[in-house]
Image: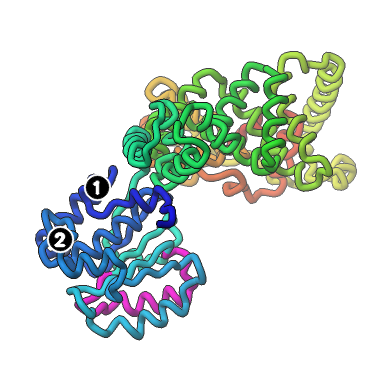
């Protein structure tokens, strides 16, 4: 008999043999037992979390002549036909293979005919978000008025790509990532079933690398068993090689401890394994972003990044060793690698250079360069002070001569803006500052997020804040209901009137006033964007 891949051998045949997804399974079982079957289901979740397996079990269960506690009996004619894949009553369409246009057209033709054997015709559409627009429209027409004998099960890893018209017609089930412990348990069964042995730590390593996906975990185990029947830690490490998340953790540790020789050795290992510097730079950027988030919102990390609890803990653990500034510096360096690599003739050198810059933070301070920089800054400050004294705010160097010449054109910047006072007698700017003070005490987490961007003004009672460049995820985090509420509460208290708050991503909150903009740009150029804060009525 031909060898069957482990993930096929271990594909669950009924709900009882499913690993994890208890909530989904118990609802579906209940529907089978009570006979309340929906016409369309949507199964969402990342790779290998059991969507397709569940769809197949569901297809058999609703057709089974005598289901047992919601599970297909496995013995009746319908169960046997479907297990043997002899029946035309269950159709599987892979939308990823060809946009599904022809299949959906066929589907619309055949959907009206009753099932050949069982009670229901079941259409399983995998990766349904890949359907083309015309295929979606065709599917929608069928979903609007499905014949009584038809059940649709749509599966997708990216539900956000589905049109609302489809979403609204389906009963949605979300499949979470499978905890590493449960994956390791199934791996243990699989190893023993294959007559092999394995250490617990080797199986845990595989489970963690699979990041909540059973199919990936079983495929990695398959590869290991291809080498030898005894699955050891070393074997797993060499099979996973540089592709595993552990490598990113070790690499970051080496950077943090400024261990340049380990860093260089690891880059060498990467290159020997045939990894692309660009891909690795992206992986590192993602890794550092995850660490930053772990540092700033450890409690929400698993849900923000869709991680298992174990993986989230690993990130939080590593982030505790590092400062935010350090992580941001590294993130900047690896993001710049991505840009530089597009033009580089020797990608490896670009990568090594960035990694070394991360390592050499303490040795690198060059006194001469620092002095130059200070002198330059002092000159720029003097220039700006001069200009401010003359009331001249040049929009561009070309206009500078004209403005300083004679007739001081009435500029917006010269006219003091009316001060908006809130019921507490504070201006909106003062209100913002006061709210920050309050938050510092009541919610230091939110306060630290707010330091990753700037206050950009107030519209009536709506206070707006913009994330610094590259820090957009702080805007996303601050717009989450609980964080936003915390800011609104502080603002309301400081203003004495119900106030609202909105965080926008970098660039989204650009001001319209050209003169001001040029001035701000000049300030930012001189002092750095992070050190410049714009306040609406500064006079
Ligand atoms: Zn049956």
Q: Based on the displayed image, in which of its 4 quarters is residue 73 positioned?
A: bottom left
> Which label number is shown at residue 17?
1
Q: Secondary structure at mark 1?
A: helix
Q: Residue at x 19, y 60 (%)?
A: 74
Q: Residue at x 30, y 76 (%)?
A: 88
User: Where's residue 130, x and y in %?
Assistant: 48, 65
Q: With respect to residue 425, does 116 lie above or below?
A: below
Q: Rounded to the nearest whole Å, what is the CA distance between mark 2 and mark 1?
A: 17 Å
Tell me, yes or no, if residue 486 can be seen here.
Answer: no
Q: What's the magenta bit mostly, secondary-structure-wise? A: helix
Q: With respect to residue 152, does 273 lie above or below?
A: above
Q: Residue furthest front?
A: 1
Can residue 324 be found in the magenta stretch? no
Residue underneath mark 2? 32
For the residues carrying marks 2 and 1, which lies nearer the camera in this image?
A: 1
User: Where's residue 202, x and y in %?
Assistant: 44, 29
Ligand 1's quadrant: bottom left
């Amino acid at each position: 008999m031909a060898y069957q891949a482990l993930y096929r051998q271990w594909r669950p045949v009924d709900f009882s043999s499913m690993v994890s997804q208890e909530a989904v399974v118990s609802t579906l079982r209940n529907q089978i037992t009570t006979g309340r079957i929906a016409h369309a289901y949507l199964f969402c979740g990342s790779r290998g979390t059991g969507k397709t397996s569940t769809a197949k079990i569901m297809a058999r269960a609703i057709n089974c002549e005598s289901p047992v506690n919601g599970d297909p009996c496995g013995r009746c004619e319908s169960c046997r036909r479907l297990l043997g894949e002899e029946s035309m009553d269950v159709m599987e369409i892979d939308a990823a293979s060809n946009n599904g246009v022809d299949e959906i057209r066929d589907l619309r033709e055949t959907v009206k005919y009753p099932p050949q054997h069982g009670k229901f015709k079941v259409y399983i559409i995998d990766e349904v978000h890949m359907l083309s627009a015309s295929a979606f429209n065709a599917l929608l027409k069928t979903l609007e008025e499905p014949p009584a004998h038809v059940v649709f099960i749509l599966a997708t890893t990216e539900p956000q790509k589905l049109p609302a018209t489809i979403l609204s017609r389906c009963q949605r089930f979300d499949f979470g990532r499978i905890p590493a412990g449960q994956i390791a348990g199934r791996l243990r069964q699989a190893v023993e079933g294959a007559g092999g042995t394995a250490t617990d730590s080797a199986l845990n390593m595989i489970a963690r690398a699979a990041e909540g996906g059973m199919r990936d975990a079983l495929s990695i185990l398959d590869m290991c068993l291809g080498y030898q029947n005894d699955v050891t830690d070393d074997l797993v490490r060499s099979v996973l090689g540089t592709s595993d998340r552990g490598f990113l953790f070790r690499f970051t540790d080496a950077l943090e401890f400024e261990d340049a020789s380990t860093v260089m050795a690891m880059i060498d290992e990467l290159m020997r394994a045939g990894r692309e510097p660009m891909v690795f730079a992206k992986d590192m950027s993602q890794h550092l972003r995850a660490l930053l988030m772990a540092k700033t919102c450890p409690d929400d990390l698993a849900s923000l990044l869709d991680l298992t609890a174990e993986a989230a803990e690993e990130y939080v653990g590593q982030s505790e060793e590092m400062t935010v500034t350090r992580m941001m510096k590294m993130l900047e360096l690896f993001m710049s690698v991505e840009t530089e690599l597009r033009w580089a003739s020797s990608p490896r050198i670009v990568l090594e250079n960035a990694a070394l810059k991360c390592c050499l933070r303490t040795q690198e301070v060059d006194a001469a360069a620092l002095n130059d920089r200070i002198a330059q800054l002092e000159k720029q400050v003097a220039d700006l002070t001069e200009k401010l004294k003359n009331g001249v705010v040049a929009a561009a160097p070309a206009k500078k001569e004209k403005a300083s010449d004679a007739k001081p054109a009435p500029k917006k910047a010269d006219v003091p803006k009316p001060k908006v006072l809130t019921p507490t007698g504070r201006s909106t700017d003062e209100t913002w500052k006061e709210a920050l003070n309050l938050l510092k005490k009541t919610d230091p987490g939110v306060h630290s997020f707010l330091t990753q961007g700037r206050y950009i003004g107030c519209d009536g009672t709506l206070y707006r804040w913009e994330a610094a460049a590259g820090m957009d995820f702080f805007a996303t985090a601050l717009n989450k209901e609980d964080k936003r509420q915390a800011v609104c509460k502080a603002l309301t208290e400081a203003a004495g009137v119900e106030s609202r708050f909105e965080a926008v991503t970098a660039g989204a909150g650009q001001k319209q006033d050209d003169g001001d903009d040029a001035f701000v740009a000049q300030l930012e150029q001189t002092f750095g964007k992070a050190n410049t804060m714009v306040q609406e009525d500064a006079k």
